[in-house]
Amino acid sequence: MGGGKMAGILPVDTRPWPERRDEALANQTMRTTISLTTRRLQAGQLKVFSDYPEAEEARQRAILDKRAAIKDMDHLLEQFSQAVHEHGGHVHLARTAPDAVKLVRAIAEDSKVRRVVKTKSMVTEEIELNRGLIEDGIEVLETDLGEYIIQRAGEKPSHILAPAAHKNREEVLRLFERDASQSGIEPPPDDDAKTLTQYARRRLRQEFLRADMGITGGNFLVAETGSVVLITNEGNADLVTTLPRVLVSVVGVEKIIADWQALQNIIQQPALNGVGQRLSSYTTIVSGPTGGDAAEGPQKWHVVLLDNGRTGLRGTEYEDVLSCIRCGACLNVCPVFRQVGGNAYGSVYSGPIGVVETPLLTEGTILAEMPMMACTMCHACVDACPMDIDLPAHILSLREENVEKHAGSFSTRQTYRWWARWWATPTGYQRSLRMARAGQRFYMRDGMLRTAPGLAKGWFQSRNMPPVAKETFHEWWKRTHEEGGDRHE
Amino acid sequence: MENVSLFVTCLIDAFRPDAAKAAVRVLERRGCSVEFPQQQTCCGQFSFNAGYQDEAALLAKHWVEAFEETSGPIVALSGSCAGMVVHSYPDLLHKWVLRHDGTEAEAESWRSRAQSVANRVYELTQWLTSLDSSGAESGDIDHSVPFVYHLGCHMRRLLRATTEAQSVMAPQGVELIEPEEADQCCGFGGTYSMAEPVVSTALADAKWKQVGCRAQESGAWGLVGTDMGCLLHLQGRASRQHNSFPVLYLSELLDLVDEGRLSPEVVNQYGGWQDGRNSSR
Amino acid sequence: MKRVVIAMNNPLVEEFAQRWATLGGLCYFAEAGTDPGAAFRQAVGDLLGEANGPGSALYWSGPDWDGKAWAEWTRPLDSVQFVAWDGTPVMREVAAGADLGITGCSWAVAATGSVALYHTPLTGLLPSVLPPAHLVLVNHKDIVATVADGLGRVRGNLPPLMKIITGPSMTADIEGTLVVGVHGPGRVAALIY
Ligand code: SF4
């Protein structure tokens, strides 16, 4: 399919980063839940690999498969389309997000769809599909419990795997009470997690049975067999793929893998790394419609393959980003993510992969500052990533691009230049320290630096600093070790 | 007698020279003859992590030239700066040459120059554990003095030096205990601490919370680290909050043990920053 | 609730049973050559729960047992109404109203404690997901070591829909609390024969 490369279009929270950040840091519920959830998931990942050596072997093979599939993407997508077609399904390619939405709206119109049920899918968040369908007067319901909660709240997911991690039980109860009165059913009697879940089961059950169209994402596309593989724990994907008469799977082109063998290698990785299970509760494999008068399965099946800036990464230093299996492991270990949660990132893709992917897919037109603002360069993400995506290296490269392009004010740039030039010679370095020492008394109180101008200003918002020593180590060494020096001070 | 070259790092040179002086004594006591290449300045990691690759390359080149003059092991007083040299220099310089219209051969030559110096780099505790004798014995150890240990992210993940500090200190009668969630970054991140002070500080506070818990459980005398960047950030935060829990660089602690001066009173002098802290000796 | 009987002297069976139980599933065994009726009735009774009184179960017969055997197994359970899956659209409502779904499986995986079901007109997937409880009948010969081994079996004759079930339906979406029985069954049992 290839052809001309095109920047993708992603939704963005246009408020500046400090505003998003401060809102997140002020949300104690979110911070507590995100911290618990990420720790639990990280521990799960470590534990499940510890007594399951086959999982690590499969991971190594899966990385090779996936890298090769990205290289061979054009051909494999062709093969995939053909196979789906042979089974009676339809494949559409969407270059950008609006193209994809247009395609799905047309399918819905064609099939006179009134009600849609959905599984959790990052891609449909990426293209803001729900908005388009709702504009056409179609009722769209998210059926993943977390997604259902935040859809009721009109919010965005805060974690790939735990979308409602920023909501506590009382908030969920209030949302469900309102929902119950609107749909004329019994509200949940209390805010126990079990009771709330039971309410959602009851409420959504009727919607599953009367929906005309199901929409899913997809964890993998198998080129050889023309299959879409879906992995969930709740079982909603099973209902979405078996009950409505029309099924639409919207999947990023990078989800392609070559064949059944590759599926065998990779199929357990999302669960192993995402939730620390050997396999999620439900793995659903769709390879075609089941026909007209069957009790279950779609009569019509459409697959919408979304590019939206992805193929533009092929052949660049960022190509490995396309291997991402959206397991969320990099989010779980990221110290910044653990503090601010997903919403602060301003994009549907958050955490380390999000700060890399969002500007890359959009050719740097949105959220270009995030690689600087949301990364301490601790390297935890690359250690956790099952696909060995070199996230810190990409974050560094994006920072570099950012510096080259525009950001970094003139004075910041000059500071870094000046700093490097002076410090690249021993005399310049030592002179600059002497100057700092001479000037620092203006910034001191009780023997400590309390403030400073320029770059260092941010430090002193919340921290002190000792002054430059009366005698640096360089000076001490020179005094004590050079000829005539006093070795013993 | 092993000849080693000391890489003190700019932060220790300027803000905590005592840590480097302690390192010299510690090394000499263990039979090393210490050289200090006076051409050295800074490894350039600040610029590198901020995206200023040309500036970082300038400092990296200078660093390589300064240490090429030496032979034998280079002992670095920072896991992070050692990580920078070992992990990032070869590619950084290779790319830099190409970006400035150098030939592939020139780029390769810089890469291999960087690589061969990098191969001689050890972080202090890595070097100490590689020595045959663990140095001055402190007699029979019937009980250990507990300290909370902060292992920096680059030492953990770029150098994979996760147990060295404990191996160095245990025979000296000091137990280093990591806090809960030890793998979580303290929030320093070089220029990150200045570019995004809010998150950086939230992380420092989270780290202090865990350090505090661990200290309380174990009765730890202080916090010890092997990266001055993290320690300045953590102690800088503590100081702003009037928390005077002692913070020591590992060489300082080891030196106190060597000299038989390890006592709560002495360790407490490392808490809070007072005027003249830098010239306590 | 967990009932694991290590039997059949077959490491794959044991591993499967163990993992299935770890996931919160019940396990029942009918020794080869014996009548599985007793184990079957025990499983149905446990899943429906005596307190719940009479219930309805939707089932489909696998190739391993014929209608006669089925009638024999179920006769003593006269408080339970058994409905056979016939692949017609009305089955959707039946499945949604049933208290228990009973299915076979095409293969099961020891390493993960999973069972795989294929959609065909006569073997539906809905009985495994719509009712609040699911009983899966597993022929011990169909237990393979790994997921890859299982998937290897289906290569080349892929049904339009298939699923691999690994434990009950669950979520941790509300404050990270684990809850079973979201959209699929919260109670699952395997009868190995
Ligand atoms: S980048 Fe790696 S760790 Fe992060 S979601 Fe993707 S696959 Fe998982």
Image: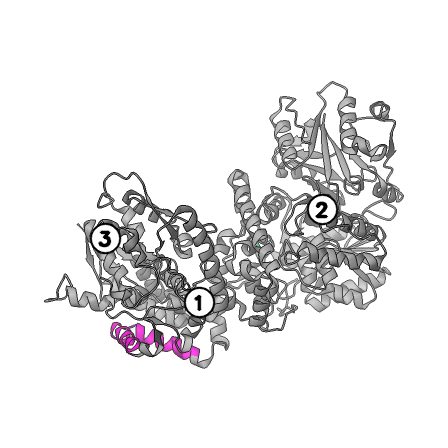
Q: CA distance from mark 1 to mark 3?
A: 31 Å
Q: Quadrant of the C terminus of chain B?
A: bottom left
Q: Main secondary structure of the magenta part?
A: helix
> How dense is the environment of label 2, judged by Cα within 10 Å: few (below 14), some, or many (20 and up)?
some
> How dense is the environment of label 1, judged by Cα within 10 Å: few (below 14), some, or many (20 and up)?
many
C106 or A463: nearer the viewer: A463
* Residue A324 in view of the camera: no
A243 or C20: nearer the viewer: C20
Residue under circle 1?
B193
Q: CA distance from mark 3 to mark 2?
A: 60 Å
A328 or A89: nearer the viewer: A328
Please state which of the two labelled residues, at mark 2 or mark 1, is closer to the viewer: 2
- Residue B72, compared with residue A474, is above or below; it is above
Residue found at x 16% / y 68%: A479
Q: Is residue B271 left or right of residue B1?
A: right
Mark 2 belongs to chain = A
Local secondary structure at mark 3: helix
Local secondary structure at mark 2: helix
Magenta stretch, residue numbers = A412-438
1 and 3 marks on the same chain: yes
* Residue C148 in view of the camera: yes
Kind of residue indicated by mark 3: Val
Residue under circle 2?
A194
Say which label, 1 or 3, has the lower sequence index. 3
Mark 3 belongs to chain = B
Picture coordinates of residue A222 (x, y %)?
Answer: 66, 50
Q: Quadrant of residue C186?
A: top right
Q: Is residue A95 left or right of residue B121?
A: right
3 and 2 marks on the same chain: no
Residue A392 inside the magenta-drawn segment: no
Picture coordinates of residue C61 (x, y %)?
Answer: 82, 31
